[in-house]
Image (cartoon, rainbow, N blue to C red):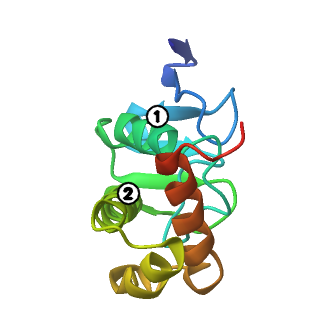
Amino acid sequence: DRHTVTLGGKTVTMTYLGAAHADDSSVLHFPAERAVFSADILQVRRLPGGLAPTVGAWIDALRIINAIDFDHALTGHALAGTKKDAADLLRYLEDISSGVASGIGAGRSLAEIQKTLTLDAYKGFERWDTTREAHIATVYATFKGTRPR
């Protein structure tokens, strides 16, 4: 789950993130540099392309990342950012999860939830306009137990 290596006086810790995105997702923590790197899970002002295998796996992974003491968030596919950016992505996933759950609890259809759960706080994120509805559909299907493995 966790492995630390020290070479040339520099230390890096690799922590397994669970099954979010892929079975081998991890985060590298460089404590002296106060930085973390995660190629696919960590996104800065950018929404993930998909939420496989589940939004819960993504939330768990981002909670692990956000529990690390760091200032600099380094990614493999987007901008570099800060710990606030990592917290913003976690908050997006928690907000979409609670919004979809509330909609289901109120008896709303997927289409109704997609129309009303706008998540405008994240409108400035890359992919918001192209993935928000797909994310809602994925979370909806997961919560309803209809999402294929």
Density class for disc 1 (Cα within 10 Å; few <14, some 14-19, many ≥20) is some
Density class for disc 2 (Cα within 10 Å; few <14, some 14-19, many ≥20) is many
Residue that label 2 marks: 97
Q: Is residue 4 left or right of residue 23?
A: left
Q: Residue at x 32, y 64 (%)?
A: 95
* Local SS, label 2: helix
Query: x, y percentage for residue 148?
Result: 71, 42
The amino acid type, in three-letter code, at marker 2 is Ser
Above or below: residue 148 compared with residue 110: above
Query: x, y percentage for residue 65?
Result: 40, 39
Q: Residue at x 37, y 55 (%)?
A: 90
Residue 87 - label? none
Q: Residue at x 46, y 33 (%)?
A: 29
Residue nearer the viewer, 83 or 23: 23
- The numbered mark, 2 or 1, whose residue comes first in the sequence reads 1
Q: Is residue 84 left or right of residue 1?
A: left
Measured Cα–Cα span from mark 2 to mark 1: 31 Å
Q: Residue furthest front?
A: 107
CB contact under 8 Å: marks 2 and 1: no
Above or below: residue 65 compared with residue 71: above
* Local SS, label 1: strand
The amino acid type, in three-letter code, at marker 1 is Phe
Nearer the camera: disc 2 or disc 1: 2
- Where is residue 128, by image quadrant? bottom right
Q: Is residue 8 left or right of residue 86?
A: right
Query: x, y percentage for residue 121?
Result: 33, 82
Residue nearer the viewer, 107 or 7: 107
Residue that label 1 marks: 30
Query: x, y percentage for residue 98?
Result: 30, 59
Q: Quadrant of the C terminus?
A: top right
